[in-house]
Image (cartoon, coloured by chain):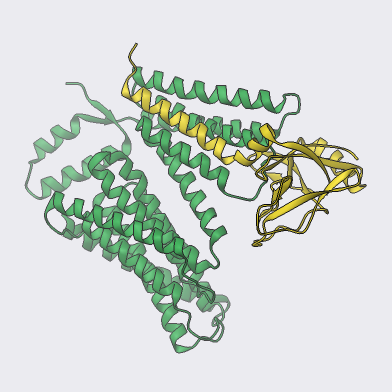
């Protein structure tokens, strides 16, 4: 069976599109597939994304504020039943650690329906929720779920 | 003999050309009538094309909206698999259609496939809770759409892909630049790049040149618009310099290709186009780095010279694009230049004259400025059309 050159080019373009989509979500995909779970304290904000719908904008009191710091690595240390960030460092520490840059540590958006987003906000405001994240050995992190503390 | 149905726009152009040939003595009245008689206006074709392309665009928007609705009844994995299947079916369906029929229908399905490709990116990001804030997702969508447009040689997907690419580039440069002057220069560098691409495409795939050229015009006019505002914090960056170098090399290549193809310099030719876009880049860069003392409310002499230079440069650039579009009948270029001129003149006139005049006097002055701009643009267009005939 022979394929036309046009069909091969379109297939290559489809593969490239798939690769670009995977590249765009690579840190979160890597953490989800290979990472370990940790629980962090969270606080809410409330926006909507034009392409991805309602989400809860989260803040983490135990992690440093987003900045263009030259010390992007934040070691994770135990804090009772939860985990929190220690002082950021310039060189890659031993795992577990997060990479935190201009937009935070890649954990501040939790996409869900508008109705559930409002319920989550109420729970977070009364400090009843913790964020379960997954972190791989290279500091890539992804948000898995929100659950009772 | 059967008559050929063509769009009203194309028929109007043909009639205009026939009248000009007749006036020049190239053909007689009988021949002109004979040629015109072979073509009739077909509104149904334009309507069908409009309906199909609009339909595909609406379906695409609806698909993205469905993803944004974030339905809880379907798990993120099911939603992701669903959108991937829709995307692949659209790609395969478009190719199947293209192998059997030509025209607008495969193009419409390809536009939908581009939207579905974006849906895959956004659904993946939603499922993995990728944070909001950066242009990476738009960049991934634009890059995939470009690859798809070139693989299919489809003009309609390229229009969407270039639009997405320009949007991503504007977002990316605004985010990484320290000041608006750097953003202006980034837009002008991209304008040189896309203009050179348009000229290179004229030799290989002329239909794609008609997409890249308006993108270059848009970037140039947006860049010059931003550069007109003084920038106290301008700092040259390595990325800007290297981007500029790549764009200039590509421009020289396009100019050489254009010159070797024609062997002469023509007022509306490729060499002139490249020369002007490089001049626009130079003028914009000069405005971006030039920050004379004084404020907008109490400017110094140098500040006034800069402001007037910015206005003249912008009006000349817009006029150039307008006459280029008119003389070479480039689709999309003339409306872009006209809209840019109106927006710029309105903004600048208000900035300059609003503190000096009020009420009726302000409108009289603005009216005079608009009339003057219109007369100059019209005379310039006529002059270039005469020269290029």
Residue found 57% across the figure and 80% down from its top: B355
Which chain is green in the rendering? B
Left or right, B357 with respect to B307, comes to right
Quarter of image, res B159: top left
Residue that sits furthest to the front in the current view: A94
Q: How far across and how far down the image is residue B143, in percent?
A: 46, 41
Which colour denotes chain A? yellow
Q: Quadrant of residue B263?
A: bottom left
Image: A81 above or below A3: below
Q: Is residue B14 above or below residue B6?
A: below
Say if residue B342 shows up in the picture.
no
Q: Quadrant of the N terminus of chain B?
A: top left
Q: Quadrant of residue A29?
A: top right
Asked if residue B71 lies left or right of residue B121, the reply is right
Q: Residue furthest bottom?
A: B301
Q: Nearer the viewer, residue B79 or B61?
A: B79
Of B353 and B125, the residue lying toward us: B125
> Camera-side residue: B62 or B196?
B196
Farthest residue toward the top? A1
- Image coordinates for residue B216, horizontal then vertical, percent: 37, 54
């Amino acid at each position: 069976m022979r394929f036309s050159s046009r069909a091969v080019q379109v297939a290559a373009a489809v593969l490239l599109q798939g690769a670009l989509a995977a590249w765009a979500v690579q840190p979160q995909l890597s953490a989800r597939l290979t990472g370990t779970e940790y629980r962090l304290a969270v606080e809410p904000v409330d926006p909507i994304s034009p392409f991805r719908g309602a989400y809860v904008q989260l803040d983490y009191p135990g992690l440093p504020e987003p900045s263009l710091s030259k010390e992007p690595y934040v070691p994770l240390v135990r804090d009772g039943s939860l985990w929190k960030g220690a002082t950021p460092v310039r060189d890659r520490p031993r795992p577990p650690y997060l990479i935190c840059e201009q937009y935070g540590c890649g954990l501040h958006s939790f996409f869900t329906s508008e109705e559930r987003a409002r319920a989550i906000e109420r729970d977070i405001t009364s400090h009843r929720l913790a964020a379960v994240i997954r972190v791989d050995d290279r500091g890539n992190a992804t948000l898995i779920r929100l659950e009772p503390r | 003999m059967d008559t050929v149905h063509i769009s009203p726009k194309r028929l109007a152009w043909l009639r205009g050309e026939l009248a000009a040939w007749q006036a020049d003595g190239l053909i007689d009245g009988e021949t002109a009538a004979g040629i015109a008689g072979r073509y009739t206006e077909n509104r149904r074709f334009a309507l069908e094309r409009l309906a199909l392309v609009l339909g595909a665009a609406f379906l695409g928007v609806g698909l993205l909206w469905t993803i944004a609705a974030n339905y809880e009844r379907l798990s993120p994995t099911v939603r992701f698999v669903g959108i991937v299947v829709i995307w692949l079916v659209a790609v395969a369906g478009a190719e199947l259609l293209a192998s059997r029929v030509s025209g607008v229908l495969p193009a419409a399905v390809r536009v939908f496939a581009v939207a579905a490709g974006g849906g895959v990116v956004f659904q993946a990001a939603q499922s993995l809770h990728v944070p909001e804030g950066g242009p990476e997702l738009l960049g991934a969508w634009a890059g995939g759409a470009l690859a798809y447009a070139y693989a299919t040689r489809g003009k309609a997907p390229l229009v969407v892909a270039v639009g997405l690419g320009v949007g991503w580039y504007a977002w990316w440069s605004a985010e990484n630049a320290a000041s608006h002057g750097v953003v202006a220069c980034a837009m002008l560098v991209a304008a040189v790049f896309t203009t050179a691409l348009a000229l290179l495409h004229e030799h290989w795939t002329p239909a794609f040149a008609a997409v890249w050229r308006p993108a270059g015009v848009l970037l140039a006019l947006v860049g010059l618009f931003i550069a007109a505002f003084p920038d106290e914090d301008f700092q040259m960056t390595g990325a800007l310099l290297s981007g500029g170098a790549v764009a200039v090399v590509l421009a020289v290549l396009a100019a050489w290709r254009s010159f070797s193809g024609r062997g002469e310099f023509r007022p509306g030719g490729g060499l002139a186009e490249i020369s002007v876009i490089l001049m626009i880049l130079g003028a914009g860069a000069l405005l971006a780095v030039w920050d004379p003392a004084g404020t907008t409310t109490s400017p110094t002499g140098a500040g006034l010279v800069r402001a007037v230079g910015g206005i003249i440069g912008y009006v000349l650039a817009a006029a150039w694009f307008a006459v280029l579009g008119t003389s070479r009948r480039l689709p999309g270029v003339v409306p872009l230049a006209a809209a840019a001129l109106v927006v710029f003149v309105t903004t600048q006139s208000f900035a300059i004259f609003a503190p000096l005049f009020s009420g009726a006097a302000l409108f009289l002055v603005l009216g005079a400025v608009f009339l003057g701009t219109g007369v100059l643009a019209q005379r310039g267009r006529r002059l270039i059309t005469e020269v290029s005939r």
